[in-house]
Image: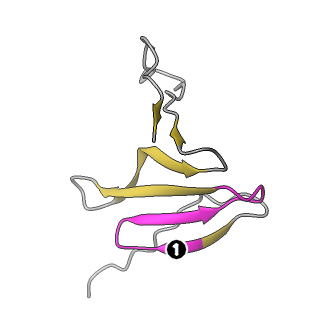
Amino acid sequence: MKDQVEVEIKILKDGDEIVGLWENRILVKHKDGCAEFFILEIDNNGHPRLNNKTWKVTKGDGEIHITKKEQSGKNQIKSGKPPKVITF
């Protein structure tokens, strides 16, 4: 018999709900009304991993803001110049 594996993805906080689920994307609606796409990737061992990028949808006037998240530990990214804001 093959070993069965249960995968648990812990991304929800109190008040969050999943509003969409696709092959490699999860759309979570947060308590404050904004929504966020989480992207799953499969590693070399066949295990799912969360991509370090998320797409957050909030109220606004058709602007896109990109920020770099600070990481702790040995994989810390040194920040350079922030990207420019793209508007429509």
Magenta region, residue range: 19-34
Residue occupying the far front of the picture: 88
Task: Look at 21% across and 53% down and name the residue there.
Answer: 44
Q: Secondary structure at mark 1?
A: strand
The one nearer the camera, 21 or 3, is 21
Is 38 inside the magenta-drawn segment? no
Would you identify the image quadrant in which residue 15 lies?
A: bottom right
- Classify 10 Å Cα crowding around label 1: few (below 14), some (14-19), many (20 and above): few
**Snapshot quadrant of residue 17:** bottom right
Image quarter in which the C terminus is found? top left
The residue identified by callout 1 is: 20
Horizontally, residue 34 falls left or right of residue 50, namely right
Residue furthest toward the left? 44
Left/right placement of residue 76 relative to residue 19 reads: left
Vertically, is 61 above or below 32?
A: above
- Total marks shown come to 1
Tell me the quarter of the image containing the N terminus: bottom left
Residue 60: image x %, image y %? 64, 45
Q: Residue at x 32, y 78 (%)?
A: 3
Residue 23 shown in magenta:
yes
Q: Is 73 or 20 nearer to us in this picture?
A: 20
Q: Position of residue 13 (x, y in %)?
A: 72, 57
Q: Amino acid at mark 1?
A: Gly
